Amino acid sequence: MILRETLKTIFHGFCIGIANIIPGISGGTLAVILGIYEKLITSIYSVFTFSFKEISKNLGFLIKIGIGVLLGVASFSKFLEYALTAFPQPVFMFFFGLILGSIPIVFKLSKINKIHWPEAIGGIITLCSMIALFFVTPSSTVSNTTPGILFFGVSGFIAAGTMVIPGISGSLILLYLGAYKPIVHAISSFNLPIIGAVGIGAICGILFFSSFIHWLFKKYHNIAYMSVIGFLAGSLLKLWPGINMNISSLISVCLGISGYFIATLLQKSTTR
């Protein structure tokens, strides 16, 4: 039983790690789909309590998630670098379906019986912010240069902070900053200075932002969940790859439908 739970938690981290290196996908979104989002945020926040009891209670869970994340990033970075270049439409359509399927799941998990104005406003604000982000053109100036280590550290901090927010893709933020391609290449080629700078920045970003999100869910639970739903719905704009009347689009549609049902299956697996 213990081994099964350990492998299950590592698998969840593995899924989150893969999501974090795909532009348009948030690791926080996968955590929501898997039903571990609030537990993950609470566990990360426990580090800030500096309480030995709280840290020891959550440390095992965080270590297992961390192992899974590292395995997901390390094993899939090179594959995704190729897949996103060679088959962008099917890849993005699959994740479009995955996110679309997660929205009703998140609403069900929120246990919101009736939407009031504060919750509605929270959802509208996050939805509009994602729509605005959709019209921002990613920077391409950094991808052909060698930025300083500090730049990668700051990029890691910003991107990792957004990774814990469902719907906002940390890798998409890196794309806007112009740091995505060099970081993915650094991971696939095992460039330790860049990986180290991004890693340190990411740890600091996750710790900082998770404390705010923990407070938000604790004080304004319904508003927080509706804001998450707004982020998720808005992220669909960036993921939509477009459809043409050809075989590739047919395959993409099938993958999108598969992603929708996989979201449901992933969520059900956490309740067993």
Image (tube, rainbow, N blue to C red):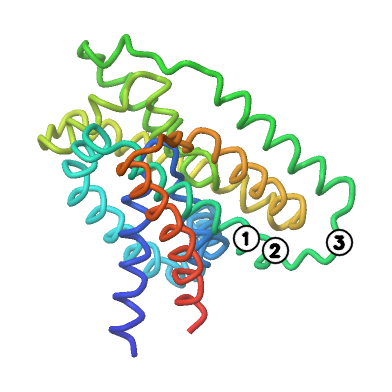
Question: Counting residues from the N terminus, which is met first, the one under dot 3 or under dot 1?
Answer: 1
Decide: is 101 above or below 140.
Answer: below
Q: Which picture quadrant has residue 155?
A: top left
Decide: is 236 above or below 181.
Answer: below
Q: Quadrant of the N terminus?
A: bottom left
The residue wearing badge 2 is 110
Q: Which mark is residue 114?
A: 3
The residue wearing badge 1 is 106
Q: The residue under label 1 is which amino acid type?
A: Val
Provide residue 107's location: percent of width, then percent of height: 68, 61
Q: Which mark is residue 241?
A: none
Q: Looking at the image, which is closer to me, 221 or 251?
A: 251
- Residue visible at 60% across and 64% down in the picture: 105
- Residue visible at 70% across and 50% down in the picture: 224
Provide residue 228's location: percent of width, then percent of height: 64, 48
Mark 1–mark 2 contact, CB under 8 Å?
yes
Whole-number angstrom distance, CA of label 2 to CA of label 3 = 11 Å
Q: Looking at the image, which is closer to me, 207 or 235?
A: 235
Q: The residue under label 3 is which amino acid type?
A: Lys
The crowd level at tag 2 (other Cα within 10 Å; few <14, some 14-19, many 20+) is some
